[in-house]
Structures are given as structure tokens and as C-alpha cells.
Amino acid sequence: MSNDLELISAVRLTKTIDTNVQEFDGIMLTIEAMDADDVSVPVFVFQREVINEAESTPDVRDKAFFSNVASPNDWQELPIGVPEDEDIVLFLYHKIQVFVRTAADAEYIWTEVSKDVRALIEHHKFMLSLLVGEPDEILEID
């Protein structure tokens, strides 16, 4: 377990749009997650591409792709940053870069990622409220 009940109560997302990507006819959207002190907050799940060693080169073996915004379980279980162990396929990172064709596509991704990060923060805020509450106040079951 990487985060041992480290919970986050706020994240600041920043969006950068680069329309001058020469290798690609489109837009590169970059979203970065930081806390109030400008420290990276790894809320994005990345998946390493599983590649047959015999058919790859070292630069290809290190590729990973954005998968999703971390779920509460991802946040607790996945390692932060690119793991040295190549057998670990999923990890958390603080920034995503997505190539899209149109500004509307970039805005859609920004909206969806923002909603998912907001849901993660709300879950963490709920968990924090449980940690500071009295046991009788935490949960009532009828």
C-alpha cells in the first residue's frame, strides 16, 4: 500500500492547451494536479504498455498511457511515480498529456477529468470527516 490513509482535501487542476504541435495535426491538452503549496498530487492512473521484449527497443519499453483518474482504491494501492519494477503495470502520476483533434474534444476531456477529480476529493473529504468524528456519529444502521 503506497499511501497509508493519506487523504487529500483539495487539488488545483491546471489546463494548458498547445495548438502548435508539429508532429500532430491537433491540440495537446496538458492537465496537472497540484496542492495549495504547488506540490504535485498524483491523481492520475497510468498503465505501462506491455511489450514483447524481443520486438521492442529500450525507448519503447518505457511508454505509459493515461488510464483514468484514480479511484479511492487506486489512491491507496498504486505506487506513486514510475516504478523501477517493470512488472508493475499501473502507477499514479500528477500530470497527463492528451492529443486531441479539436478544442471541443479538449474541453470535453477537461470537464470529465475535473468531475472525476472532484469526486475523488469529495470521497476523501468524507473519509476525513469520519476520521475526526466520534464513533457514534460515524454511521447509523437501522
Image: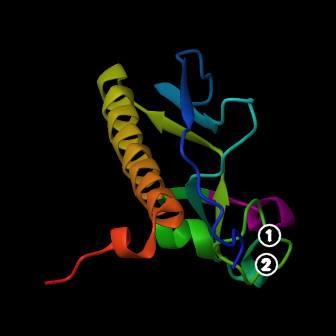
Give residue 24's position: percent from left, percent from top: 54, 30
Residue 51 drawn above or below residue 22:
below
Q: Which residue bears the numbered disc 1?
A: 83
For image coordinates 13% across by 84% down, the residue present is 142
Residue 139 drawn above or below residue 20:
below
Q: Please state which of residues 55 and 139 is positioned toward the viewer in this rendering.
A: 139
Magenta-drawn stretch contains 116: no
Q: Secondary structure at mark 1?
A: loop
As drawn, the residue found furthest toward the left would be: 142
34 sits to left or right of 74: right
Q: Please state which of residues 99 and 32 is positioned toward the viewer in this rendering.
A: 32
The structure's colour scheme is rainbow
Label 1 – label 2 distance at C-alpha: 7 Å
Which of the numbered marks, if any, corresponds to residue 1?
none
Give residue 31's position: percent from left, percent from top: 55, 34
Q: Secondary structure at mark 2?
A: loop
The amino acid type, in three-letter code, at marker 2 is Glu
Give residue 107's position: percent from left, percent from top: 35, 26
Marks 1/2 in contact by CB < 8 Å: the verdict is yes
Query: Over which residues does the magenta segment extend?
Result: 57-64
